Image (cartoon, grey):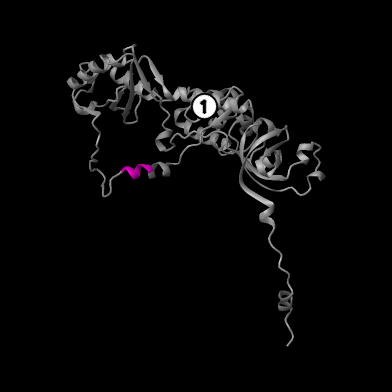
Amino acid sequence: MAESQNESRNKYKVYRPNRMKDLTVTGREGTIIKNSIEWAIIDMENDGWAFFNSITVNKTCKFNVDNVSECFPIGTKVRFNARMWLEPEGSTYTDQDVRSCRWIVNSVRTSLFVPIPVMHNSAFNFDSYNVPPEILPSDKIGEAVIGLMKRLKSINGLPIKQIVKTYTSEFSNIPVNIRTVLSSADKLRILVRCLPRYFILTDHDTVLAYNCREKDDVDLEIGKLIPVGWRPNEPITVNVGQNTHIIEHPTDCAAVVEEILAGPKPITIALDCEGESLGKTGKLTLLQMSTSTGQAYLVDVLAVPNPTTFFAEGGLKKLLENPNVIKVIHDCRADNAALFHQFAVTLSNVFDTAVSSDILEIQDVLLIVNL
């Protein structure tokens, strides 16, 4: 019986292994070791070098980059996909290091700077940031942050002039008033400096963004803290420990203040305030303090009809305004605004750990950039 054409073809078909897995790499990390205006070389450690040019960058980022060396300085950590470069000697590039590359990059992104502040809906309440209204209205700042984050998602560390050009020359669905800020170098610098929780402006006039955690991840962590079987509006019992004291009366608060002021010198306390959209008009509901001796105090200012009595008769105003007491606070802007406008308290001798962290991170970034 005669074989059909397809049966005959399958009978004598020769099996050829798929060699593409050996010719491609995905999700690799490396370091920029050489660059120019048009191209850069990545060190893949034990696997040789990989090459990419401005065309690869523009394809990955979806916007045009004029100078590869400014966006990918030497020492920059990158993540990329690449394929084996079979004939680098036949390329139009004359640089010998380029011709020595084993791989050619398909897509590339930076992975330079990774702090982890929490990003969720309430993080876009920018009342505590002093962005001048002539730069951008407060209700538009969140959109500006998202627009800028989209640019920095691909290349974290873009020069100001490159960001400005992308918003000047390219179509975008960002509102005109926000685009006006992002396409002006001077206004963009002011905006970035006013948002230190999200961005850093380096001495090289480049903008770095924090990598923020997603709301779902935060909700998952919070869910782990809720007891099994808990129902909404039920109180949650919390064991505060032997060294933690809940203060619900101004008399007890005054005794605590006197104990702190009589403690070992120099006097240092950690301070934090909680409230409803805490700020100039956001109500302060809880004040937390801890001392160098390991004691912690939770002052429930709503436990009495008039919360100001905790600051007057309770001595909190005297403690917080005392220049000989060091107050360690993380990002004290909202706390300071609430204390000043609601209780006439002027904080003094504050060590803000958010500011010190930003300074250290800027120093780290500058060390990397200057390598």
Can see residue 44? no
Amino acid on which disc 1 is placed: Glu
Point out residue 296 in the picture as x, y percentages from the top left corner. 28, 26
Q: Is residue 217 left or right of residue 309?
A: right
Categorize mark 1 by other alpha carbons within 10 Å: few (<14), some (14-19), many (20+). Answer: some
Q: How many marks?
A: 1
Instruction: Work out whether residue 188 or residue 156 is closer to the camera in this orientation and state it.
Output: 156
Which corner quadrant of the image does residue 310 belong to? Answer: top left
Point out residue 34 in the picture as x, y percentages from the top left corner. 71, 33
Point out residue 60 in the picture as x, y percentages from the top left corner. 64, 43
Residues in magenta? Answer: 221-225
Label 1 element class:
helix
Instruction: Work out whether residue 20 or residue 107 is closer to the camera in this orientation and state it.
Output: 20
Q: Is residue 281 above or below residue 114?
A: above
Can see residue 112? yes
Single out the residue that lies furthest toward the front: 46
Q: Is residue 114 left or right of residue 61?
A: left
Which corner quadrant of the image does residue 290 belong to? Answer: top left
Instruction: Work out whether residue 1 or residue 102 is closer to the camera in this orientation and state it.
Output: 102
Q: Is residue 250 above or below residue 19?
A: above
Q: Is residue 123 magenta?
A: no
Which corner quadrant of the image does residue 247 belong to? Answer: top left
Single out the residue that lies furthest toward the bottom: 1
Residue topped by disc 1: 361
| Quadrant in which the C terminus appears | top right
Point out residue 23 in the picture as x, y percentages from the top left corner. 69, 52
